[in-house]
Image (cartoon, grey):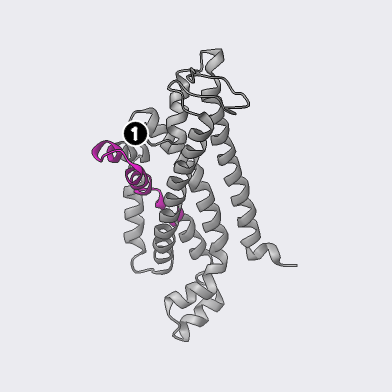
Amino acid sequence: MQLRNLPPSKEFIMGTNSIGQDMWSRTWSGTRTSLLVGFAVACIDATLGVVMGIVWGFSRKVEWIFTELYNVFDNIPQTLVLILVSYVLRPSVPTIILALSVTGWLMTARFVRNQVVIIRDRDYNLASKCLGTTLWRIVAHNLAPFLVSVITLRMAMAIPVAISDEVFVTYIGLGLPLNIPSLGNLVISGIDKILEPTLRYQMIFPAVILCIVTVSFYVVGNAFADASDPRNHIY
């Protein structure tokens, strides 16, 4: 039986591709790979961004150092870093994660730093410092509740951004190898079929899943950020 390029049917819900592979299995396997990349990048960005942002905003002695480092890294285009890392290292999931994490933590660090600067000189923080309370205890008890919403939103937004960057890297030929299914590989493979009406489903289904993932994380991230912000629970 010829299984290549079969349209969607009861047997193959999303049809098959040019070599007879089930698009349903490929799409969900690719979604799992892309979500793995997205979650890994989000965790790395959150960890580095929170630590750097807290030290940057709370320690006046080293604030200028972090400011200069931020200016240096921020002036390096992320796309250029992404291309260089992907080109130098062997294409793989760890390579993509590393490439997306090199400068991704900068935005989180800046957001956290801005929040810390706003509340670091409030009376209760000054009183805690006068009583000899350690920095990390002050952060845990006085600053963390105000940072949860920022961190949650940044992590939720970092996941679809990482997936979109993975699609871009795949588009320029530096992404994951074709034997590792991902949304990037599926979307790029489907682009060649978009002009053929009977084969457009190979582009449409992965693109729809990509849109659903992006919108879902944006909506859920905003909901969690609002729910975790203590200012929204003042009556």
Residue in the foreground of this view, choosing between 193 and 120:
193
Instruction: From the top left corner, tell me how far across and down residue 38 is, in percent.
Output: 46, 46
**Which structural element holds mark 1?**
loop
Which residue appears farthest toward the bottom when viewing the image?
131
Examine the structure image and report whether residue 107 is included in the region drawn in magenta.
Answer: yes
| Residue found 44% across the figure and 75% down from its top | 136
Which residue appears farthest toward the left when viewing the image?
88
Provide the residue designation for mark 1.
177
Q: Is residue 160 above or below residue 145?
A: above
Instruction: From the top left corner, tell me how far across and down residue 225 is, in percent.
Output: 60, 56
On the image, which quarter does residue 185 sit in?
A: top left
Q: Principal SS element in the magenta part?
A: helix
Q: Which portion, as a residue range, is magenta?
A: 84-109
Q: Is residue 42 above or below residue 135?
A: above
| Residue found 45% across the figure and 47% down from its top | 36
| Residue found 41% across the figure and 52% down from its top | 105
Residue in the foreground of this view, choosing between 225 and 128:
225
